[in-house]
Structures are given as structure tokens and as C-alpha cells.
Amino acid sequence: MGESFRTRSASAGTSTAEIQAPIDQDIARALSTQLADHHRLAFARSFAHAVIRCAWRSDDLQPAASPDGVEMMPLSVDAAAAAERLGAAIGKMPAEQAAYVVGTVYTTALPEPYRATLGIFYTPPELVERLLVMSEEAGVKWSACRALDPACGGGAFLLPVARRMITALKGTDPVFILQQLGARLHGFDIDPFGAWLAQAMLELALQDLARAAGRAVPKIVETRDSLDLKTGDHGAYDLVVGNPPYGRVSPAIERRTVFRRSIYGHANLYGLFTDAGLRWANEGGVIGYVTPTSMLSGLYYKALRELLAAEARPHAVNFVSERDGVFADVLQETMLATYRRCRKSRTGKVGFIGIGAAGAVSFRPAGTFALPVQPAAPWLLPRTPDQTALSTRLRAMPYRLGDYGYGVSTGPLVWNRFKGQFRAQPSAGNFPVIWAESVTRDGRFLWRSEKRNHAPWFAARRPKDDWLIVTQPCVLLQRTTAKEQPRRLIAAELPASFIKKHGGVTVENHLNMVRPVVAKPSVPPAVIATLLNSAAVDAAFRCINGSVAVSAFELEEMPLPAPAVIRKVAKLVGAGAKMAAIEAVLAAAYERADAAAAA
């Protein structure tokens, strides 16, 4: 096969985009979707298995004929030919690139429910390399460290870790190197085929070393539910690294009890894996994970943030600033983070990593950050390189919505729970329904129900439904926006006159309500609406938010200007001042010279 892909590394300059360009990876998905759902899992495994067999064809040593206990199926002529082409192309790739492509081929062919349940997404080699560099900067020494990937399917992390260990042991006996790999490198995966895939890719990548040693590659990967912790797991590793599965779960009572220290309300798989990583890592050990950014600020991660602050403060956080095409079918904001188990107070480093259209990797450091005094509070970090100074300023601002007499709650009306109570025409006892489209993009309240199933009236069953009726003036705020939008915060005052006219309204749960929580708040709702619609406050929110959801918890934790500034804004609002004048005041409060200039 010419130069073996086993002898080349992904760091040689070949990008993911460059090696994927001639490969039709979507063929596996296309062939899979032609099958009945109950056949797709067996097809995905059989297709990926055939690809590996074809890539390995010219070697005298072969992986196991098929993973033990895994259902397989014969491939059609077309599928077998496609696997042949993919295998031939993959056989010419660097090992880490090959592992990623095979893993992606496998996952895209999986039935969606299976993939979603296990949270199976493979990591691009560029991000793997960056996270391993971050691990080295946190103190990992490849010559002696014990490393674990607890969600290793496909081997995206195991292969480059093995390469680093081999490089660190260069010049020693091949038998000793293989023994060291078997003793110090481990991978777990709950998916039996994913585990086989990782072991097979390791065996293929390490065959030259195995031949030199005159013995087989040791068993490195184990099929196992990583969250079933065992006594020997605790403190066993110097590095726990990987891309843990994502997704909300409802753990059985036994598992919830084990992980109760890091669960607040809903549990997410990656949060449980983070907690488990702290247990696997020894004192001074490093945890390096690719995860969504939601844990930085979400309410359901407050216990996890407290745990990390107590046991393993972040050493570095790198945000993936260019996410399109980074993870197939993943829309969440993504970050790479390293934590080190130590009791010293540490200052974390922030940076940004981008993968361009041609696969070029860029990295931009963005200074340091300190965790909040209250460890459960959101971590205020720049989400773009130009927010570095702003995030530093935010960490010194003590005022929140609660200091001005306001709290945030979600609109109480979940429409599909009350389908029988919607009406197209008004009648006695009906109340207007406030849908998300009633808050316009330019920050005005315009009562409307234009979308499908959005009836304008709600027939309340008094007094049973009184809790659904809003009779207090408030500020309405859209609950779902994306970072690509010009504004994340889109708010409008719900006028007292509208409420008085109808005797109350009901607000659908795609809106947040910012409402007075004291008898006499410091400023009227119109001032709060103006604050939320300003560029300065929108920028502050972007430093706290980690998802497309505009959550009540994050809004209540968002830093706001001091009372003197708020009083000045209130006077301007009361006098009917132009928004530019208000923006200038707020920009100065946040020390945002760019916003002040624009205003």
C-alpha cells in the first residue's frame, strides 16, 4: 500500500478537510436511510466493519472477524463496493484522520434514536490535537502518565495519546513500549461496536510496533458503562481525556445517588462524565474534555460548577469559535476545557480555536479569568476574542436584576397541555394569549398570533387556571435566540393598559417574564426593557450564556450597572431620549468604548 498510514501522524499537516474531500462519507447515511429502522444499527456496524477490513487488507495480521455479541448483516453489492472504496482511501491516511473518518462513517449511518441515546459524535483530529496540547500545558507527561478515555469509540483520542507515549519512549525496546501502552493507556465505551472499532484502529495503527516487538497489540479498550464506577477506578489516572456523550438523562435512583454531588435538577450525560473524571483522576491529575458550553452558566449545572471549584479548577478553556462543519449534526456551542485536581486557587486561561473551510486551525489566546466568589454562579468568560476586556469588567460588577426589584420567570402557558382551551374568537372569561411573535425584533409589543396553532384567546377555567393569568405589568423577553443573531436579548414592555383592558393575559412559555418581585421596584418596567434591548447589556449576556436558550437563571445572574447609572437611564427613558444617548451611558458603565463610539 506504499507508505503505511500507521507510520504517519495527523500533525504532519494534512487537514480533515483535505483528506475528506475525495471521500463520499455520506454514502453510508444514504444507504442506511433506505433500510427499515430496525436494520440500520446492524447495517452501520457491518458497513464500518467492512471499511476497516478493506483498509487492512494488505496486512498479514487482521482484526477479529467481527465484534463479539454484535448483530451484523450481509451488505448489498452497492454497499460492499462503497465500503471497498472508502477502505482503500482510508488506508492511505494518517492514523488519527483514518479513525475520525471511520468513526464519522459509522455514526452517520446509525439510527438516530440509538445515536442520540448514547450521545455518539466523534471528534475532529484538529480538536483532539488542541486538547492534548492543553493537557500537556496543564502538566501531563507522556513518558509516565496513565491515561483513560472513558468514551473512546473509534479511538479518536487513544491513537494520538498512544503516538505521544511512543514518542516519549523512543529508543527503548519495542516490547517495553507495548507493555507500557497496555499498562498505561485505557479506553471504555458502552457501545460494543464502538469499543471494537477503537481497538481495531489501535491494532492497525500499531502493527509496525507489534511486528518489531514480535507480539500482538495489547488489549486497551474495554466494553463498559463508564458511569458504573468501581473501587479501583478512584485516583487511577493522571489524565482523563475525551469527548463524553451529551444529552439529558433520567438516572436510576442508584446512579443519581452516586452522582448527587454534581446533579441539580435535570442530569446531562456530560455532566456525569465530568464528575466521574474527577474520581478517575489522581491528585494533580488532569481532566480534559470536549463538551457543550452550557455547563458554564446553566442552572442545572450549578452543583457541577461548585464541585469543580472545590476539586478541580479549570486550567484552560478554549471555545470553538467556528463551529460549522466541526461536528456532524451538532449545533451546540462547543468548548475544550482542562481541569487539574489540586487544592490551590488557580487562574484559568481562555482562548479561541477555529477550523477554517480548508481545515486550517487557528488559535487565539484571550487572557485569564477567575472563578466567581459564589462557586455556583455562572463563569463569566469572553465568548469571542473581542470580549476579553468586557468579561473582566463584568466580573467586578456586583449588581443584578434582583437589586432593582425584579425577577425572571418563564411564561406559564405550555400550549400543548391546554389544547382544548384555545379559542379563535373572544368571549366572556377569555384572555389574550401572548405568543413569542408578539415581541418584535425591534423591541416592541405587538399582540398577534400569526403562526400555526397560535390561537389568540385562552378560555380560563376559574379559579383552577388563575395561576396562568398575568395581571401585573412586566417585560417580555424571547427565550430562544442564537449567537449568530444581531441581538440575543429581544425584549418589550407588556403595557399596563393592555392588561387593564382585558383583565389579564396568559403568556406562552417561549417567552420569559421579567416581573417586579417587590411592591415598589427601583425603576419601572419600561426602563428594564430599554436596558435589555441595549447593545451593552446584550454583549454582557453573551459572556454569560452558553446555549440558544435565554434562561431565567442567566438573566438574573447577568451583571448590570450601578444604581446611579440606572437612575440616569430612567431619566432619559422618562424624557423620551433617543436610544443612542442611552446606549452611550450604558457603554460607559460597561467600559465598552466600541459601543460608545457606535452610539
Image: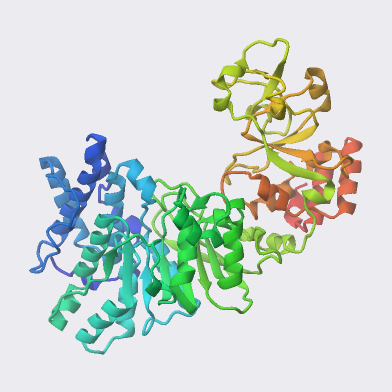
Quadrant placement of the N terminus: bottom left
Residue 410, quarter of picture:
top right
Q: Nearer the viewer, residue 594 or 547?
A: 547
User: In this figure, what is the number of numbered marks?
Assistant: 0
Q: Residue at x 27, y 42 (%)?
A: 29
What x and y, as percent, mark residue 146?
37, 78
Does residue 271 show up?
no
Which residue is pictured at 69% across the width and 26% down the height? 506
Horizontally, is 224 left or right of 530 in the view? left
| Left or right: 424 as drawn, with respect to 155 | right
Along the line of sight, which residue is nearer the eye, 80 or 428?
Answer: 428
Q: Is residue 216 above or below residue 80?
A: below
511 to the left or right of 136: right
Residue at the image point whose x is 24% and y is 82% from the top: 179
Of 441 and 195, nearer the camera is 195
Residue 252 visible in the snapshot: yes
Q: Position of residue 243 (x, y in %)?
A: 41, 60
Q: Compared with residue 516, is residue 87 higher up or lower down, i.e. above or below?
A: below
User: Residue 151, position in %: x, y?
Assistant: 36, 61
Q: Residue at 32% across / 67% down in the picture?
A: 187
Nearer-the-camera pick, 452 or 537: 452
